[in-house]
Amino acid sequence: MTHGAVSGSGDTAVSLRVASGAGGSGREFGLSRRPRRIAGRTVTFDNEGFLWTVDDWSEDLATALAVEVGLTELAGTHWRVLRFLRRYYRENGRAPLNRQLALGTEMPLLDLERLFPGGIKQGARRLAGLPNPKTCM
């Protein structure tokens, strides 16, 4: 799933214009794409650090992103949350509500919030490679 058609190249940020009803991204959300080298490859992120394309995610990428936010190791509980988020997104086309995440991972919501720097929305979703919450309206 991409955020829209893009023109331009290099490391410059490129703002997008997306047709209405496309799920949102681009100028109306203040997002732009930023390619960068991480985990041995070039991956495109938006200017808030979320993957531009969900399919660019890998466990190696999640690990590299975790190190950047101060998680030196992703434990089994981290992976359980990340895999649940990805599976739910793949099956439903959207991120789970917090209640669904808590039920699906069998973890209390407060524990989920504390597990990732940035909490669920800015932490877990970002490491799981889900789209920026701003684009999911």
Image (cartoon, grey):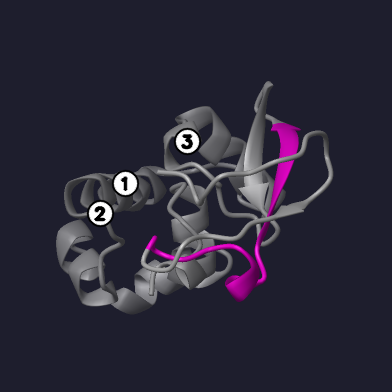
Can you give x and y, in whole percent of width and height, for residue 43 in the image?
A: 64, 34
Q: Amino acid at mark 3?
A: Trp
Q: Which residues are magenta?
A: 22-37
User: Are there few (<14), some (14-19), or many (20+) residues within 10 Å of tag 1?
Assistant: many
Q: Is residue 95 left or right of residue 123?
A: left
Vertical placement of 99 versus 8: above or below?
below
Q: Specify the quadrant of the image occupied by residue 10.
A: top right
- Image mark for residue 86: 1
Residue 3 position within the rendered picture, expressed as x and y whole percent measured from the top left:
50, 51
Is 12 in the magenta? no
Which residue is denoted by mark 3 in the rendering? 57
Instruction: Give percent across and percent down for residue 86.
Output: 31, 46
Q: Is residue 56 visible?
A: yes
Residue depicted at x 23% and y 69%: 102
SS state under label 1: helix
User: Residue 137 is drawn in which quadrant?
Assistant: bottom left
The residue under label 2 is 93
